[in-house]
Amino acid sequence: MMEQNENPALNAHNKQEYPPAHTAEHLLNQTMVRMFGCERSKNMHIERKKSKINYDLPSCPTEEQIREVERKMNELIAMDLPVTYELVGRDQLPEGIKLDRLPDDASETLRIVRIGDYDICPCIGAHVNSTREVGAFRITSTSYNDGSFRIVFKVEGK
């Protein structure tokens, strides 16, 4: 872990995320990984009004499974999990961190985002301080086409 007084160079961030929706994206990614054994999404559009996120799945989840995803998300939000950050060098990555989604010019120092003990990943985006700030999570629609499962969701940030 980096020393407190060090000022590492991180990549510039060119997005203005809505922190509640962006934090929900992290929770949703981990929920989908745990429930369906898929990879984190590589294709998403996260916004204040509505967000879309796609997962590669061999078949379309059932209505019951979709309701369980929404229920699990709201359970995690209600747990008020802390969202914390740490700066680490690439040679000090916590176990389980994948770097395959980082840009080619990513800095040697990475910011790791943890949501309680539920999710951990490198990210330079904006997040809430705890999951309760995400507010209610609602799946507004889903679709499945050629191995791609899309979830459209809204959050009601606090």
Image (spheres, rainbow, N blue to C red):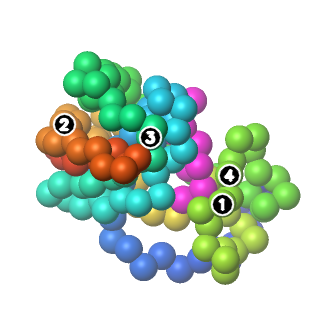
Q: Disc 2 and disc 1: Cα gap in Å?
A: 29 Å
Q: Tell me the element at label 2.
A: strand
Residue under label 2, please give it.
Answer: 138
Foreground tag (3 vs 4): 3
Dot 4: within a 10 Å radius of its alpha carbon, few (fewer than 14), some, or many (20 or more) residues?
few
Q: Tell me the element at label 1.
A: loop
Say what amino acid the circle numbered 3 marks.
Answer: Leu
Say what amino acid the circle numbered 2 marks.
Answer: Arg
Locate residue 91: give its quadrant: bottom right
Question: Residue 59's mark?
Answer: none
Question: Residue 57's mark?
Answer: 3
**Residue 101: where, in percent of width, then height?**
59, 62
Question: Residue 100's mark?
Answer: 1
Q: Are marks 4 and 1 in contact (CB under 8 Å)?
A: yes
Residue under label 4, please give it.
Answer: 98
Q: Disc 3 and disc 1: Cα gap in Å?
A: 19 Å
Residues shaded magenta: 113-123
Foreground tag (3 vs 1): 3
Q: Residue at x 42, y 79 (%)?
A: 14
